[in-house]
Image (cartoon, helix red, strand yellow):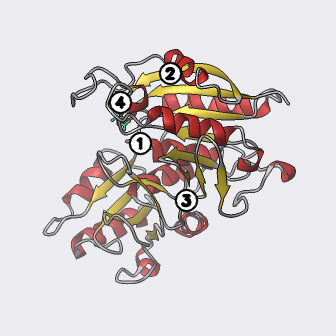
Amino acid sequence: MSSARILVLGTGGTIAGAGSGATGAAYRPGGLALDSLVAHLSALGLDAELAAREIARIGSQDIGWAEWEALHAACTAALDDPGIAGVIITHGTDTAEETAFLLDLTLPSTKPIVLVGAMRPADAVGADGMRNFANAVKVASDPAASGRGVMLVMGDAILAARDARKAATSSIDAFRSFPRGPLARVTPASIDWYGPPHRVGPENGGAARYAFPQELPRVAILTAGAGMDEKPVEALLGIGARGIVLAGMGQGNAPRVVIEALARAAASGVPVVRATRVDEGLVDRNVEVDDDALGLVAARALGPAKARVLLMVLIANGVTDAGAVQAAFDGG
Ligand code: GLU
């Protein structure tokens, strides 16, 4: 049997980071060319043929519409190419959950698409990048990985884009999967899937759920803090915010004057989603905030960063009515 052909799209991040040597702290994310990473990986003797294409060499804090559009187009072409079994995207970990979720919302799930990153630069002692990359090759070559949407591979675990969340700034075990646990355990030698595909698979089309946005509507995240007033909400409306995500306290709470200002924003046609600044936990409707009366949306399991991605995609697709926005968050 011939090896699976995998397209590797490089964007940068710590997995391609170097500069400090084995024990230094400072480094430059994206300092290494994708070709050198792929050559290193190919030398490990994995059963896959890798074709590399560099989209960018940046820290993922700088990623935006241009890189997302290029990734979406490259993935779309790969999904249509019968010679390609799957796609790996090397990515910084800071915004990996946002890129993964955006692509998950806007691409079919007919072949595995896997983001992979690292917490330690390639030239650090105990670098994790090659291990994670080798694991990603295993996932992208596995036909059983189709129908599971876009995935993130970090630390021998496979996380669904909808659930993945960076929860530590520097620990090697930086990602959590919430509210559902990891989809599988992976090593360069094996994959153990814990359940069947949660998205429709290749046999029934695996269609994309939303069109890719032609531009990103301005959606702001507002973090709630004790004692704040409504002025930041007014400032966001003043700069033309088309949607607001509240990173609220607890179950998406904020001081009364802030909630009232957000309700006025919603009444003026700017959708408002209540998420939480707490690391994990659901935000449900009508707990302490009367969403029905105020026209607000509860983010459910999505944290603020991914709630913003979904709200941008919805607005770009013409979905702004609170009921329809809530239905999309309920389905997340
Ligand atoms: N801030 C950089 C990035 O997200 C480095 C962090 C990392 O990759 O872990 O690309």
Quarter, ligand 1: top left
Residue named by callout 2: 37
Q: Amino acid at mark 4?
A: Pro
Q: Residue at x 58, y 45 (%)?
A: 187
Rendered view: 149 above or below 249: above
Q: CA distance from mark 1 to mark 2?
A: 21 Å
Circle 2 crowding by C-alpha within 10 Å: few under 14, some 14–19, many from 20: some
Mark toward the start of the polypeptide (4 vs 1): 1
Tag 2 secondary structure = helix
- State the residue in front, 260 or 288: 288
Percent position (x, y) of residue 236? 29, 51
Rendered view: 53 above or below 128: above
Residue named by callout 1: 95
Tag 3 secondary structure = loop
- The quarter of the picture where residue 319 lies is bottom right
Residue named by callout 3: 182
Circle 1 crowding by C-alpha within 10 Å: few under 14, some 14–19, many from 20: many
Mark toward the start of the polypeptide (3 vs 4): 4
Ligand 1 within 8 angstroms of badge 1 C-beta: yes
Left or right of residue 208, residue 170 in this image: left
Tag 1 secondary structure = loop
Can residue 212 be seen here?
no
Q: Amino acid at mark 2?
A: Leu
Can residue 154 be seen here?
yes
- The numbered mark at residue 121 is 4
Q: Amino acid at mark 3?
A: Pro
